[in-house]
Image (cartoon, helix red, strand yellow):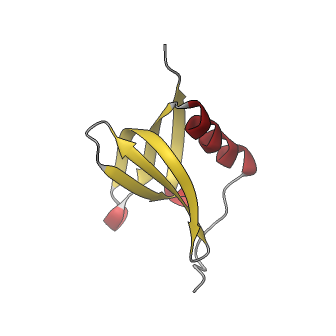
Amino acid sequence: MMNKDYIPIPCATYNQYETAILRGYSLRVGWKGARAIDRVETLNPQDLRTRAGAEYMIAQNQLGQYRVIRLDRIKYAQTLRPM
């Protein structure tokens, strides 16, 4: 089943997420969550996956909780490089 309302994200943005995963960088992510509630968290992205025609980021927050975020719902993601 295809997800017809998914809007593909720019390749440069996808590359930013891939780079964060490969280099172990955290991201400060703002996204539109369930019931259209704005969310902001510092996350450690683990993987990018495609399911039912939409792309998702699998990430872990600082408390160890996992988040699965549809990429077109992410408003911004700031890369936080380790010091």
Q: Which residue reaches farthest top? A: 83
Q: Nearer the viewer, residue 13 or 62?
A: 62
Q: Nearer the viewer, residue 47 or 26?
A: 47
Residue 67 in the image: x percent, y percent? 37, 53
Q: Which residue reaches farthest bottom? A: 1
Residue 45 in the image: x percent, y percent? 48, 43
The image quadrant that residue 41 belongs to is top left
Count of numbered badges drawn on the protein: 0
Q: Residue at x 44, y 38 (%)?
A: 44
The image quadrant that residue 72 belongs to is bottom right
Q: Nearer the viewer, residue 51 or 9?
A: 51
Residue 40 in the image: x percent, y percent? 37, 42
Q: Residue at x 37, y 45 (%)?
A: 60
Q: Quadrant of the N terminus?
A: bottom right
Residue 50 in the image: x percent, y percent? 59, 66
Q: In the figure, is residue 31 to the left or right of 64?
A: right
Q: Say if 30 sits above or below 42 in the image.
A: below
Q: Which residue reaches farthest right? A: 11
Q: Residue at x 43, y 48 (%)?
A: 59
Q: Residue at x 44, y 44 (%)?
A: 30
The image quadrant that residue 32 belongs to is bottom left
Q: Nearer the viewer, residue 4 or 27?
A: 27
Q: In the figure, is residue 19 to the left or right of 39?
A: right
